[in-house]
Image (cartoon, rainbow, N blue to C red):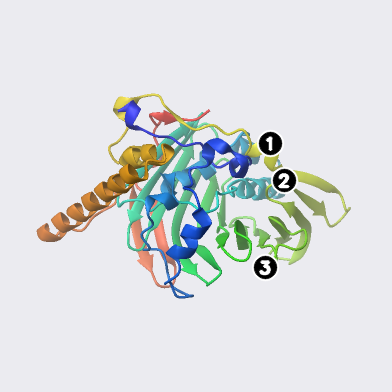
Amino acid sequence: METKIVLARPFSLESESDPDANYKAPNILRRILSLFSNVRPGSDVSCFKLPPVFNMPKSELQCYGECVYSTALDMLSNINRGNTPLDRLISVVAWSISTVRPLWFGVAPYNPTLGETHHVSKGNLNVLLEQVSHHPPVSALHATDDKENIEMIWCHSTVPKFTGTSVEAHVHGKRQLKLHNHGETYEMNAPNLLIRIFPIPGNDNVGDVSIRCLETNLVAELSYISQSFFRFGTNRRQIKGKIIDSLSAKLLYKIEGHWDSTVTVKNTDNAEVRVIYDANEVISGLQAPIVMDPESVWPTETTLVWSELSQAIVNKDWEKATEAKKTVEERQRELQRERESKGKTWIPKHFRVSYSKEEGWDCSPIQKSVPNAPIVTL
């Protein structure tokens, strides 16, 4: 089983210039233009079927997981060590920024299959993801660190839309970070992903992110700023924001920087400025996870589900990749037909899932704690 699993390197600060991470077929921009030639602006492209030449060797589920377990520093422990609620919120802001990673232009992860999972451990942090819905695509994440008494719960639904010159993937759903030792829960959203095709191809994270501590009423507001249409100016991967006390509306800190370099906070009382995030220290030199116990890897593990396709993409064997992708997709259609013939509704294994028009998707983990995983990262 171990030889079948393909674990690609995580997104890191070096991703864009890493030759080992370049899985794109030749003439990728021309292929992209051809792909979207008949797509109308405003169209939802979440169900758009991409040929393998547009895929990277990993699913979106793995990408979400990497945001949590692939860091060079233990930022979660640093949050726990904060002496005051304000100290901890500032550390949560830095951790939230660390979940934003440079992506490869021209390729996208696989759309996870229904029930697909990703289970990885890093030290005492155990991370579990499950694809709880396929149409629309909804991914759930549960992570626990029993030593630090920290818990994470995410529920994400991504809706990509074609604008005519770009694709903007709107990320719906909330993230919760719970510090049980401090009795604090932080709720936040995620920035959207902008994939610009014209006039200069590239990726940006854009939009507003709000981070709120439910118990202390401290709030951080961040804006991920897109570059100008022609990439003029210095706002590449820029972040601006503030931290306020929502009860008094007092401005406590100003936030400024670039998520792929450094981010600072400025104290509004004494004008002191300090660095709270350094991307070079946090998301550089990251390595792919390794399989420690092949026999314990679940059949639903994303790196196993897509193993043949991932290996074909790494080898740039596009004919084999096409067949491998068809095999996975046809298997999913067979399972769907089988459920329908028996009148069964698919139920997630690891999460309770609900949806309301007002609140959107909600994913609640069934188990209190995530177990150790057979796949680990250092």
Query: What amino acid type is highlighted by mark number 3?
Result: Phe
Compare marks 3 and 1 and give the one earlier in the sequence: 3
Whether residue 274 can be seen here: yes
Kindly give the residue lying farthest to the left in the view shown. 342
Residue wearing tag 3: 229
Q: Quadrant of residue 188?
A: bottom right
Q: Is residue 132 left or right of residue 58?
A: left
Residue 230, x across and y down, in percent = 70, 66
Query: Is the residue 102 above or below the residue 222 in the image?
Result: above
* Amino acid residing under circle 2: Ser
- Mark 2 or mark 1: whose residue is earlier in sequence: 2
Residue nearest the observer in this picture, 56 or 177? 56
Seen at 53% across and 65% down, the residue is 168
Q: Where residue 9 sits: x, y (%)?
A: 51, 36
- What secondary structure is marked by label 3? loop
Measured Cα–Cα span from mark 2 to mark 1: 9 Å
In the rendered picture of this protein, how many numbered marks are placed on residues? 3
The answer for how far apart the CA atoms under marks 3 and 1 are is: 30 Å
Mark yes or no: residue 349 visible.
Answer: no
Whole-percent x, y for residue 169 in the image: 50, 62
Identify which residue is drawn at 43% across, 72% down: 39
Front: mark 2 or 3: 3
Q: Which mark is residue 31?
A: none
Q: Regarding mark 2 in the picture, which secondary structure is present there?
A: loop
Q: Position of residue 40 (x, y in %)?
A: 45, 75
- Horizontal side, residue 247 vs residue 64: left or right: right
Task: Using the numbered discs, state the Cα–Cα distance from disc 2 to disc 3 in whole angstroms.
Answer: 22 Å
Q: Amino acid at mark 1?
A: Glu
Residue under label 2: 261
Considering depth in this image, is 263 or 218 the residue closer to the camera?
263
